Structure formats: C-alpha cells, structure tokens
C-alpha cells in the first residue's frame, strides 16, 4: 500500500535529468524515471514496467532511444500497443503521449508529462524578484540575465529545475565551461544535485572536479575564487587543478542569510548560516570576465539560490505530507467499508452492534455470520493504535469471517488465527477477541481470548461467564478452549471492548464493570449503555474506541 | 512521555522500578530498550510496577514479547507491585498464568532463590 512518506533524495522521479513515465491504474499512480534503454514493458516480473493483467503479453513492448528521441516498439503482443488511442507497431514519442499496452482505458502510461506547478510553489518562487544586486553593477546584460532567470523560475516548481536554471545563469555570467551544484547530504558529504556545461548539456560528477575545493568551501563556509591558477602559488595540493589544467575555479557556499533583530532595529545584523551546499564553476582557460563580474553578483546568486532551494524543499515536504495524508484517508475509508457489518436476519435471535470511534483509523471491529451452525458474532480489539493496529484488524477480520462462514469450530478458528499471527513474527501485536455462536435451540458456545468478559443478562440478572483464554497472536504455544451456556427466551448476551470499561471522566474515574452491569441489568436497550457512558464521561473525550454488541435470544 | 525508569541491584538481581505509565509508543519503547540492555548482562530481572498507574495493550504486548525472547535466551523476568487494575488485566487476559507476579519486590527477589542479606 506504500503508506510511508517519501524522503526524496535531491533528484527524485520527476527530475529534469531523465524523461519520466507516469503509470496510472485505477487509483494507483506511479512515476518512473526512464533512466535506461531499452525500457521493457510486459507481464513478466523481470520487466522494467510490470503490468499484471492477462491481456498484457509477457514481452509486450519496449521503449528505445536514438539521438535523444524516444520510441515505443510493440514486441509482437497479442492485444497490441496503443499511442493516443491508435494501434502502433513502432512510433516516436512526444511529450504527453498516452501509451496503452493490451488494455484500453484500464491502465495507461503518460510519456514525459509536463510537470504541474502547484500554487504554493509559485508563491514561494515569486520572491526571486527581491534579488539584491550590488550597486556597482551597471552592466545591462547582467540585469537581463537575472530577469530571464526570474521569469523562468516563476514557471517551474521543482528543485531540480531551479538548480539547472541557476547553473545556466551562472555559466552565462562567468563564461565558465562547467558548473555544478553539490548539496550537503545527511551524512555531511556532498552529493551532486545538478551539472551543466556551457552548451547546456547535463554533466555528471567526475574526477576532474576538484573535490578538495568543494569540501573546503563547505567546511569553511567561505568563497574560493581563483581566476588564473597559473598565478596562484597555493595550489600544490590541488591535484585535479594541476592534472586537468583547470585555470579558473570558483566555488561558492550556498547559504541563506539569517537576519537577527538586534536592539537597534535600524541596523539588523546579518549572520552567516551554515552552508547547505556549494555552487562550483570551472574552466580550462583563465577568464578575464570573472574579475569583471564582481563577487557580489555571484554571492547574490548563491544566496538567492539557497533561499529558493530551502523553499523548494519545504514545498516538496509539504507535498509529501499531503500525499501521505491522502493515502491515510484512502486507507481509513477502505477500513470503514470493511467494518460495515450487515446484520443477518435470523428468526431466533436479534443482533445489534455499534462502534464509537475516537480515531480516524482503528483496531476494533465486530462482525456477524449466519450459517447452519448458528448465528455467530465476533468482537475483536487489536493492541496498539493507528495504522498498524488497523492493518492487523482487517486481516484478522477476513480470517475469522471466512472460517465462520465455512462453519469451522470456534476453537479451531482461534487456534488457526493464533498460529498465523505468531508464526508471522509481527512482534508485539496481538488481539483480544470473543467469538460467540448461538444455535436456534438456545445453545450458546463462546471462546473468550483475553477479552473483557461478556455480560449475560437473564431477566435483569447480570452474570459474567468467567471462562477465558490467552489473547491471539501473543504466544505460539497457547491452547484454546470454549465454554457453553444455554439461553432462554429473552436472554441477552452483551459484548464490549475495554474502551467502554476504561472510559474516563474528568475526575479520572473509570466507567468500570459495576456501572456497565448496572445499566445492562436495568435496561433492555443497547443504546442506554451508550447514554450512560456519555453521561458518565461528561465532556471528557474518549481515549479509545468503544464497541458494544448485543445478541438477544428470542427462540 | 510519562515514564521514568530507576535501575538498581538487589542481591545480584537487577530491578527496573518504573514510575508513571507504560503505553504503546514512547514509553513502551523506553522500557523495552532498558530491558534489552539489562538482559545483555543479566539473567534475572525484576520489573517493579508499583508506581505505574496505567499499562495499556501496547505496554502489555511489549512485556510479553520481551519476556518470551528473554526466556528463549535462558533469562527470566518477574513482575512485582502490580496494583488491582493491572492484576485484573492480567487475570482477564490469562497472562497471570504466563508471568510470575509478586506483591512486593522483596518477594520477587526471594523467588529468584537469592537469600536476603
């Protein structure tokens, strides 16, 4: 289900470094980097894109590239390959083309779609118009370049595109041959985020870059500028510079200024924050232009870039959080549907149940199944909270429901469930549960696995059948046994979760068994239990889910 | 986070006295780490729950889990000082038959076979 939020590296799918494919199937959407060719598509599990549908051939199609152009080629598939609805044998791909393999309108792939900008990204990026340029600058060309960059940056929303634009701008200004942005990774080392040469071609990290300069710049958090290495005597240790004949090297730390308010508000002090990365440009020729491009401008670029990178990261984090929330809501709604119980209509018994959730996604459930063996009801409570409890609850529900529907003996059901969960070594997760099954002659069999004992109400007298077992999922060697009771017309069996007995009021008192028994004995309506609970708690919110299930034998 | 764990030794047996509550999440994680750490060098451990006002299903699951793996390693964990509510919970879940439970820390120490000083 993939519920963990993505912690992206600097270059995540959607980066401008590789073209991307967006695969859509129902609710699922996945972005894949087209980072190698041939890129294979098919039903076989070793394909780059596996589509598990019988109408997709095992070796369905491939995507190839020639001279920077991508094409899709059908590999003799049974049901064909389609581009924009048209069946093709081999077709060159253009941006936003829609590919379908074997099945139409069920799943599809979009080739290199335009990256959608979010409004929040645009807002953040509009601050580029506030770039500070040194007042020495009169060169119109330099200003024009800034404005070009501003316009470009306003139309994109990805970190990678910001970095690439930054590099292109810097290369134009300095007339250097190569430019790179390295970002500081979590382990303190430097990772290449983007690289470009003066021809606009992407570059990867290589030995000719002076890593010693990069690290020194990052560590010292100060600039390193050499405009003619032949004149600098301080380069004995710089192997790359000497070996690859680099003449000009400029390395700037990327850092945002942290403006601290001082008592004298008229003169705020600018403190240097830690470098988050470095901007590096070099050339094999001495650049006369470097000295004329004042360091101020480069510093301005570096500072602005750092702010933009920071903002882009925040936007990315915000989007990741939003996607995670979305997935969580989908999970919650699926669980809601699983929890919806259809109460079977049975002539000899009446079943009623209600769940009060205090959490969006929970570990309580109840279910009911009617078979020839009788009307069975299960109430379960999985340990812990949140998504992990919910996951286990849903699995548990499925296992128990199907075995009840098959008429399996109750003890065998809980033994099988315990076996399954303990052998899967999930850890400390377990569940307490009660399964009760009533036959039309009034014979009730129940298995209590570590759960709050049921209430048996016979003519206003409340009995707590004491028979119990260990919970399920806790100890592999646990054995289980059931107990039987004979019910008479009008007898009621009430099952609750501990959210009821452990509900607290403002004073810190618990609802407890005696109050539960009192209301169960007095009233014949399940709703009165909930009213008593609400009255007791007053305004104090529930800290745990409450479920009450009532079975009335009308025999 | 409402759990403080006090570690002390009594006649060669390690006692982890817990103060506060033990719930699914941070507190259960804290006690689990403390127990795991103590179990690397000790075969006999007592968890004193006299000052614990709440133990939820997550905390209980953690205790059972740690006890099971300790047992597999030949170590033993005893519980002492359980209040009425905790004893009720162990009773309902039938875990009273699985854990060795004592009213006082001293009784647990003696049960390990250590003689009082």
Image (tube, rainbow, N blue to C red):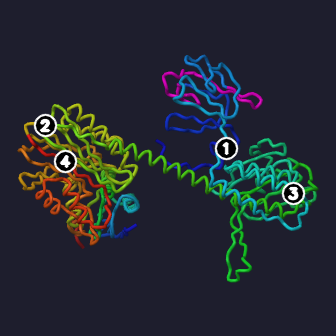
- Same chain for mark 4 and mark 2? The answer is yes
Vertical order, A4 against A508 (above or below): above
Q: Residue furthest bottom?
A: A263
> Do we see residue B106 in this rendering?
yes
Residue position for label 1: A15
> Dot 2 lies on which element?
loop
**Chain of residue at mark 2:** A
- The CA span between labels 1 and 4 is 55 Å
**Chain of residue at mark 4:** A
- The CA span between labels 3 and 4 is 79 Å
Vertical order, A131 against A419 (above or below): below
1 or 4: mark nearer the eye: 1
Residue position for label 2: A347
Answer whether labels 1 and 4 touch (C-beta < 8 Å). Answer: no
**Chain of residue at mark 3:** A
Residue position for label 3: A142
Judge left or right: residue A223 versus residue A342: right
3 or 2: mark nearer the eye: 2
Residue A63 colored in magenta in the image:
yes
Residue A241 x/y as whole percent? 85, 52
Point 9% across, 54% down: residue:
A463
* Of A55 and A336, the residue lying toward us: A336
Give the mark nearer the N terminus: 1 vs 3.
1
Judge left or right: residue B70 versus residue A18: left
* Of A147 and A249, the residue lying toward us: A147
Answer whether labels 1 and 3 touch (C-beta < 8 Å). Answer: no
Give the mark nearer the N terminus: 2 vs 1.
1
Residue position for label 4: A448
Judge left or right: residue A115 versus residue A58: right
Report the span colored magenta: A43-71
Residue A345 x/y as whole percent? 19, 37
């Amino acid at each position: 289900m993939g519920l963990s939020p993505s912690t992206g590296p600097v270059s995540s799918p959607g980066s401008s470094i590789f073209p991307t494919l967006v695969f859509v199937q129902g609710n699922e959407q996945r972005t894949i980097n087209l980072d190698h060719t041939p890129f294979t598509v098919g039903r076989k599990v070793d394909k780059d894109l596996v589509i598990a549908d019988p109408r997709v051939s095992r070796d369905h199609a491939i995507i190839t590239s020639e001279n920077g152009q991508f094409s899709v080629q059908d590999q003799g598939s049974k049901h064909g390959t389609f581009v924009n609805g048209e069946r093709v044998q081999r077709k060159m791909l253009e941006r936003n083309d829609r590919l379908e393999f074997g099945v139409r309108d069920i799943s599809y792939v979009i080739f290199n779609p335009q990256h959608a900008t979010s409004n929040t990204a645009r807002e953040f990026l509009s601050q580029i118009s506030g770039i500070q340029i040194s007042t020495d600058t009169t060169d119109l060309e330099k200003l024009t370049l800034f404005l070009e960059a501003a316009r470009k940056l306003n139309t994109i929303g990805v970190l990678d595109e910001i970095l690439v634009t930054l590099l292109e701008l810097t290369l134009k200004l300095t007339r250097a041959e190569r430019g790179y942005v390295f970002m500081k990774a979590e382990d303190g080392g430097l990772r290449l985020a983007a690289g470009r040469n003066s021809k606009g071609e992407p570059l990867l990290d290589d030995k000719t870059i002076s890593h010693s300069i990069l690290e020194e710049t990052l560590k010292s958090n100060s600039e390193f500028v050499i405009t003619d290495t032949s004149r600098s005597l301080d380069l004995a240790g710089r192997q790359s510079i000497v070996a690859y004949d680099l003449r000009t090297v400029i390395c700037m730390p990327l850092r945002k200024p942290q403006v601290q308010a001082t008592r004298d508000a008229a003169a705020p002090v600018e403190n240097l924050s830690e470098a988050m990365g470095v901007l590096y440009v070099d050339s094999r020729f001495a650049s006369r232009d470097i000295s004329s491009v004042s360091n101020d401008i480069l510093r301005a670029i570096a500072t602005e870039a750092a702010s933009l990178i920071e903002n882009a990261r925040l936007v990315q984090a915000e989007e990741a959080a939003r996607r995670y929330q979305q997935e969580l809501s989908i999970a919650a709604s699926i669980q809601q549907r699983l929890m919806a119980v259809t109460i079977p209509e049975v002539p000899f018994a009446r079943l009623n149940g209600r769940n009060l959730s205090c959490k969006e996604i929970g570990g309580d459930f109840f279910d009911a199944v009617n078979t020839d063996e009788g009307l069975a009801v299960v109430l379960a409570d999985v340990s812990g909270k949140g998504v992990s409890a919910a996951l286990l609850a849903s699995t548990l529900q499925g296992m128990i429901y199907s075995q009840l529907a098959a008429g399996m003996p109750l003890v065998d059901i809980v033994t099988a469930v315990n076996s399954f969960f303990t052998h899967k070594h999930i850890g400390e997760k377990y569940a307490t549960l009660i399964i009760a099954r009533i036959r039309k002659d009034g014979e009730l069999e129940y298995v209590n696995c570590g759960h709050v004992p049921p209430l048996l109400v016979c003519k206003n007298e409340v009995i707590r059948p004491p028979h119990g077992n260990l919970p399920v999922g806790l100890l592999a060697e646990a054995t289980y046994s059931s107990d039987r009771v004979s019910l008479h017309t009008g007898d009621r069996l009430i099952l609750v979760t501990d959210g009821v007995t452990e509900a607290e009021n403002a004073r810190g008192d618990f609802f407890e068994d005696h109050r539960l028994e009192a209301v169960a004995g007095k009233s014949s309506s399940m709703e009165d239990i909930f009213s008593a609970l609400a009255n007791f708690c007053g305004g104090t919110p529930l800290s745990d889910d409450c479920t009450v299930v009532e079975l009335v034998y009308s025999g | 986070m409402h759990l403080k764990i006090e570690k002390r030794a009594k006649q060669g047996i390690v006692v982890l006295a817990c103060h506060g509550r033990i719930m699914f999440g941070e507190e259960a994680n804290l006690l689990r780490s403390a127990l795991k750490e103590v179990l690397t060098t000790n075969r006999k451990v007592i968890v004193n729950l006299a000052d614990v006002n709440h133990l939820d299903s997550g905390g209980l699951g953690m205790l059972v889990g740690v006890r099971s793996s300790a047992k597999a390693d030949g170590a033993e964990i005893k519980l002492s000082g359980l209040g009425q509510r905790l004893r009720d919970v162990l009773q309902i879940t039938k875990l009273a038959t699985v854990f060795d439970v004592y009213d006082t820390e001293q009784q647990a120490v003696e049960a390990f076979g250590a003689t009082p000083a």
